[in-house]
Amino acid sequence: MVPFLDLKAPYQELRAELDAAWRRVNEAGWYVLGREVEAFEHEWAAYCGTQHCVGVANGLEALHLTLRAWGIGEGDEVIVPSHTFIATWLAVTYAGARPVPVEPDERTGNIDSNRIEAALSPRTRAIVPVHLYGQAAAMPEITAIAQRHGLKVLEDAAQAHGATWEGRRTGALGDAAAFSFYPGKNLGALGDAGAVTTNDSALADRLRVLRNYGSRVKYENEAAGYNERLDELQAAVLRAKLPRLDAWNDRRRRIAQRYLAQLAGLPSLELPLVALGADPVWHLFVVKTRGRSKLHDFLADRGIGTLIHYPIPPHLSGAYAASGYRRGDFPLAERLAAEVLSLPMGPHLTDAQAAEVVAAVRAFEDRR
Ligand SMILES: *Cc1c(COP(=O)(O)O)cnc(C)c1O
């Protein structure tokens, strides 16, 4: 049996640290916006190489509150990838603005920076590149476009904790970055959690107010804010896990190297491409194949778990039914949605399990 991702293993590895985190929060008797959140914010900002980090309730709100804090809303447009998890789009929609999709570079799956300028209008306010599957988007090109047109860049770094572009970590590559610490991410809480990193102190200040009912001083509400705070308990858990993140990412890299080497040259399988300048953290290892459902079933029969990220592009989902999109509007996103398959990937996948995956994929190919 090779599970797609083992979510129990981190506790087996870090039982003492995680139990201590739980005890610390219980003994302090302080559960919301206290020392653990503050300490995690310092530690995560230091890790990413930014001056500020603001903990929030989840990744979607990290995106949404940042757009709000910039005053982006009704009548504005925001560039998003056509191929992404729907949260990237929903954050723009929540803010009252319109997501404007741009097709991916098919080799990496990330937003194609060459197509961004054609999608700009006088209403465009920001670009939200996603570092999809753990690989940084082409940030130098994207930030250059943003500078030329006076736009903000908000990294959606929910899949890319620790990934770099030319040695600089995601989280520090735009005007601000949104992270998710959903349990399955490279750094995961025991439930929902998120954060924004930035070097902009005015933005950080605004986010602290927005996440907490628009309030700086209790019961004084200077803005119509939200309840989107990061819990003390989740912050304590993240602090316990953060020291392991680099080692866990290295382990993912080794598994990816094995997959890339041992699955190379199979005629029906397209392997992920790493762009020059990017050092991915392999949140997912995504292959492309026309025979996806057959490969999925073949692997499932051998106890190997795979998933699809993502089967329905946002523009064809029910959430955007009222926007009038049709099949064929974003053919590259549609093709990826039809062909991508994520192989087992995680820091606790053993060499034997990775070998089993390789052997099974090769056996599938031989049978064709
Ligand atoms: C997980 C994810 C999000 C949303 O994070 P949540 O914490 O689940 O709200 C946003 N964008 C991308 C690309 C993601 O993978």
Image (spheres, rainbow, N blue to C red):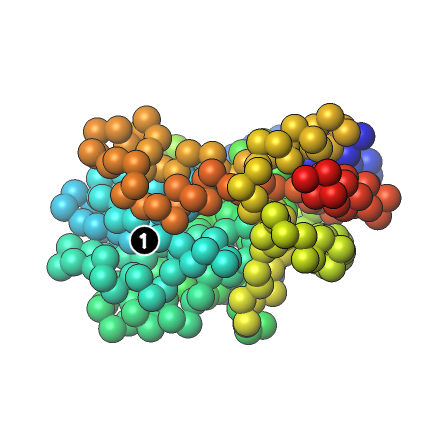
Within 10 Å of disc 1 (Cα), the crowding (few <14, some 14-19, many 20+) is: many
The quarter of the picture where the C terminus appears is top right
- Would residue 301 be found to the left or right of residue 324 on screen? right
Q: Quadrant of residue 177?
A: bottom left
**Pointer 1: what residue?**
102
Q: Residue furthest front?
A: 368
Question: Horizontal and vertical percent for residue 9?
Answer: 78, 36
Q: Nearer the viewer, residue 244 or 147?
A: 147
- Would residue 346 be found to the left or right of residue 272 on screen? right
Question: Horizontal and vertical percent for residue 162?
Answer: 60, 58
| Amino acid at pointer 1 | Val
Q: Quadrant of residue 2?
A: top right
Residue at 74% x, 43% y is 366
Residue 176 shows in this picture? no
The quarter of the picture where the N terminus appears is top right
Residue at 63% x, 52% y is 267
- Would residue 198 be found to the left or right of residue 181 on screen? left
Question: Horizontal and vertical percent for residue 165?
Answer: 53, 68
In this rendering, the answer to whether 36 lies above or below 151 is above
Residue at 18% x, 49% y is 76
Q: Nearer the viewer, residue 247 or 319?
A: 319
Residue at 39% x, 38% y is 313
Q: Quadrant of residue 17?
A: top right
